[in-house]
Image (cartoon, grey):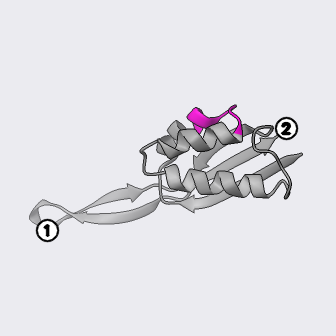
Amino acid sequence: MKGKAIARFTRVGPRKVNQILDVIRGKSVSQAYKLLKFTKKMATPMVMKTLKSAVANIGKHVDENKIYVKETYAGQGPVLKRLRPMAMGRGSIYRRKTSHVTIVVGD
């Protein structure tokens, strides 16, 4: 059995999300929940929510100790361009990065 969940257009850069995804890749789902509970990063709640969705997509009666996180990756989403005031009345563009997070769980 296999379950997949995709969180699209999340307001966190993909490099920051990949740091968390590297921690839970290959672990059992119950162990991944424990690791995410004590990880203090901004993207942790979003990864936890996506992982719960992937487990729910498998089915109802599933033992979390027998299911493993098979694939995790975060790709680049669209970049939101914003202006920041600079010296002498000019504006400087800064970019708010987004990402698409994919988590696949299975036996």
- Farthest-out residue, bottom: 89
Magenta highlight range: 21-28
Q: Residues within 10 Å of mark 2 (few under 14, many from 20)?
A: few
Q: Residue at x 80, y 57 (%)?
A: 57
Q: Which amino acid does label 1 sit on?
A: Gly
Q: Which mark is residue 89?
A: 1
Give the left or right position of residue 40, taking residue 69 as reference.
Answer: left
**Which residue appears farthest toward the right when viewing the image?**
1
In front of the other: 20 or 9: 20
x and y percentages locating residue 17 in the rendered image: 52, 45
* Residue corresponding to mark 2: 107
Residue 81 magenta: no
Q: What residue type is labelled 2?
A: Asp
Q: Regarding mark 2 in the picture, which secondary structure is present there?
A: loop
Instruction: Tell me the quarter of the image containing the N terminus.
Output: top right
Quadrant position of residue 92: bottom left
Q: Is residue 15 visible?
A: yes
Residue 25 is tagged as none
Pinpoint residue 107: horizontal percent, then vertical percent: 85, 38
Point out residue 44 in the picture as x, y percentages from the top left corner.
50, 49
Whole-percent x and y of residue 24? 61, 36
